[in-house]
């Protein structure tokens, strides 16, 4: 087989969730049907790796010093929502209910995966809470995912924030809208019962 | 969101089977955890689109005028196996049972998808059968897939080859090795019965 093709198939396997079969299918498709798309992808990769960096305030991806959300003067700087990824932030934004600022961890604590407090930018978060780089924060909303690692991350950050004398809240756990109780797992029902209102 | 990041997410959706969610996950992963991999992927894409072309004889991907399989003097040039993709060719090669040459369609007939005889290189196949560019062919083995489109492609090519007075065979349909009859679909059992030996 062509060596350049082999290299492309190997390189495509750096993408998450892509094994050798999908990578081959992708490579054949690009070379056979979409060489233009291959060129665009190469350009986009180079541009993004060169230009995208982290927002000085919230740690998310941006091309400027401070991201659009952090630069928006309409937002309530006293509310800080901690999320794992830009995708989680986007999901919250789509609800339209939250008008505060964000801190994006770009991951979650995972001792086995070698992701510690440094990797998720807890030092930056502390600076932010100290009120030196932006408005003082009066409440931190923990919106990490409800998995073991997400809960552990929320726990660590919660302690950190409380030690600064700042109020901490966590997104409510409960029965998802539209579900029938019969099909909801027991842990969720137990939480929904305990947090009933 | 950063514009370069948006462009990368859009470009990643050119890959088959990748929607906006997977594309975002891929982009975040590359930028956050594997910028080196992103650079390698960009390089591999550019190199492959620049250097990979089609073999003059069998139509598969190669970086030279004629691919390794076609250039191998040990192979029986009188046997020509028609497959849809380089992946199908690789699967056949792994069995080690076939020692003839190949013709790779790089697709299959799909009138609705705009893929006609020209796109799968039937003119090249005809040239090859005429014995002008390589050894004369005495048997064509049709190894396109056993789907509706693959069968239609095999049918069209079979007629073409027969019209040249060359023998045509098709891979046998039957019960896969290791299957229990109970779980095999009826069409396969019917074919296995009709072709019993």
Image (cartoon, coloured by chain):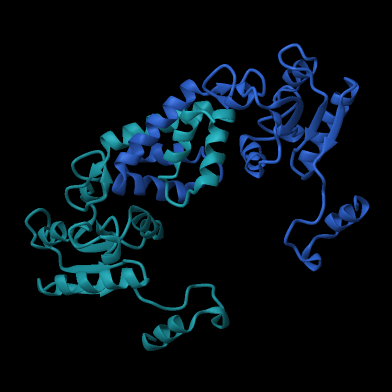
Chain colours: A blue, B cyan
* B13 over B133 or under it: above or below: above
Q: Nearer the viewer, residue B91 or B22?
A: B22
Q: Position of residue A78 (x, y in %)?
A: 77, 24
Residue in the picture at 80% in, 42% down: A171
- Residue at horizontal 63 percent and vertical 17 percent from the top: A56
The image quadrant that residue B128 belongs to is: bottom left
Q: How many marks?
A: 0
Expressed as whole percent of the image width and height from the top left, the position of residue A47 reads 43, 25
Between residue A128 and residue A120, name the one nearer to us: A128
Placement of the N terminus of chain A among the 4 image quadrants: top left
Task: Give the vertical position of A150 relative to B161 (above or below).
Answer: above
Residue B140 as seen in the image, left or right of residue A141: left
Q: Quadrant of residue B43?
A: top left
Is A190 on the left-hand or right-hand side of A80? right
**Is residue B103 found left or right of A187 in the rendered image?**
left
Q: Position of residue A28 (x, y in %)?
A: 35, 48
- Where does residue A29 sit, x and y in percent of width and height? 35, 49
Q: Residue at x 46, y 52 (%)?
A: B17
In this view, which residue lies farthest toward the right? A194
Looking at this view, is B163 or A83 the one in front? Answer: A83
Looking at the rendering, which quadrant does residue A147 occupy? top right
Q: In the orientation shown, which residue stands out farthest toward the front?
A: A74
């Amino acid at each position: 087989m062509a060596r350049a093709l082999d290299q492309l198939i190997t390189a495509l396997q750096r993408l998450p969730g892509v094994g050798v079969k999908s990578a081959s299918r992708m490579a054949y498709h690009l070379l056979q049907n979409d060489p233009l798309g291959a060129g665009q992808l190469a350009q986009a990769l180079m541009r993004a790796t060169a230009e995208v960096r982290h927002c000085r305030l919230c740690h998310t991806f941006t091309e400027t010093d401070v991201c659009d959300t952090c630069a928006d003067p309409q937002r309530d700087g006293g509310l800080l929502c901690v999320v794992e990824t830009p995708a989680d932030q986007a999901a919250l934004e789509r609800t339209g209910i939250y008008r505060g600022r964000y801190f994006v961890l770009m991951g979650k604590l995972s001792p086995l995966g070698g992701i510690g407090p440094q990797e998720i930018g807890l030092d930056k978060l502390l600076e932010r809470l100290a009120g030196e780089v932006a408005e003082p924060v009066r409440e931190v909303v923990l919106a990490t995912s409800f998995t073991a690692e997400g809960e552990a991350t929320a726990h660590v950050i919660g302690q950190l924030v409380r030690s600064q004398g700042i109020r901490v809240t966590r997104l409510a756990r409960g029965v998802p809208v539209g579900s029938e109780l019969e099909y909801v797992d027991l842990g969720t029902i137990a939480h929904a019962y305990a947090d009933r209102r």
